[in-house]
Amino acid sequence: MAGVLIDQDERVLLAQRPPGKHLAGAWEFPGGKLEPGESAQDGLARELREELGIEAGAGEPLARVPWAYGPKRLLLDAWTLRRWEGTPQPLEHTALQWADPHAVDLALLAPADRAILQALRLPQRYPITPADLSPEAHDACAGMVRDALARGERLLQLRLPLWPVEQVRALAAELLPEARRQRAQLLLNADVEGARMLGAGVGVQLKASQLGAWTERPLPWNQPVGASCHDAAELVLALQLGADFATLSPVAMTATHPGVPALGWTAFAALVEAAAVPVYALGGMGEADAAHARALGGQGVAGIRGFRRR
């Protein structure tokens, strides 16, 4: 169990692992192992009492992260908590710190805890620009993205296959100041070099064909990396290269790929349960599907339909 304590300033509590323990010095979310027959809520409350000296209120499920440290396998079940009694104290850790979740350096976290932080700070919706926009539609596309930012979207992919790569990069550079003001992130489709040139606030959505080409994360931790996946093997590759999240498609039939069989929600749930990165449902998705995707363990939904300007 892992407790993600969130205070009134929307900061999260991180705890530093003490000397002599596995991953000593790394930061993590406080918690520990369930005892036989113990419920998730009871086990988390007991662990937070032992580690922080607090009495935890009711929490809400956030993410379940299967992980392996060598031969040791674990399932990290993370819950968010906004109410507790007492002041957290480092009873079993070297130190505690309250941090803005968007400012935390993921490289400082224990590897299994990175997916928890990403699940916390990633939004439920991941809009993607329509692929049929022509290069002449620059102003319309820029307006669409600005409208999305104004509506509160915080993760947007610029997928414009008809545009020259330089024009897509120029659009991202034009929109980047506004995205940064809104604490939003723009992702280029498949263009790692363009993301590197533009820097913080711009990431990349890797195609499935690119996943096996990288042996390590292609961008720094302050630039998001998404992975386009269609099966369990590609979700494993996404984890191995350090992707922040994955899209899994097609969950439903789509007009753009009429001959591609859909995974369906049952397969989506099974794949998400075994994945150690946050996963968005993609393919035939609208805003109304976000709650269902999250109920099955997903991060939310991604796509074009349902995100166009109304």
Image: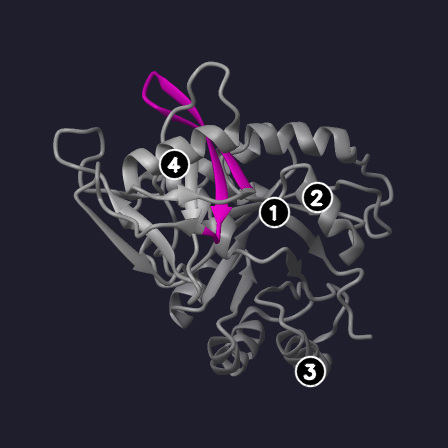
Return the x and y of residue 118 as percentages of the image width and height.
Answer: 47, 50
Disc number lying in front (3 or 1): 1
Residue stretch in magenta = 62-83
* Residue most extreme to the bottom: 139
Q: Earlier in the sequence, mark 2 or mark 1?
A: 2
**Amino acid marked by disc 1:** Gln
State the residue position of label 1. 299
Q: Is residue 19 above or below residue 69?
A: below
Q: Secondary structure at mark 3?
A: helix
Identify the residue at image location x=58%, y=42%: 208
- Coloration mode: one colour
Q: Earlier in the sequence, mark 3 or mark 2?
A: 3
Please state if 233 lies on the left or on the right of 194 as rendered.
right
Mark pair 3, 2: CA separation:
28 Å
**Amino acid marked by disc 4:** Ala
Q: Earlier in the sequence, mark 4 or mark 2?
A: 4
Asked whether disc 2 touches disc 1, contact meaning CB atoms under 8 Å apart, the reply is yes
Label 3 environment density (alpha carbons within 10 Å; few <14, some 14–19, many ≥20): some
Asked whether disc 3 touches disc 1, contact meaning CB atoms under 8 Å apart, the reply is no
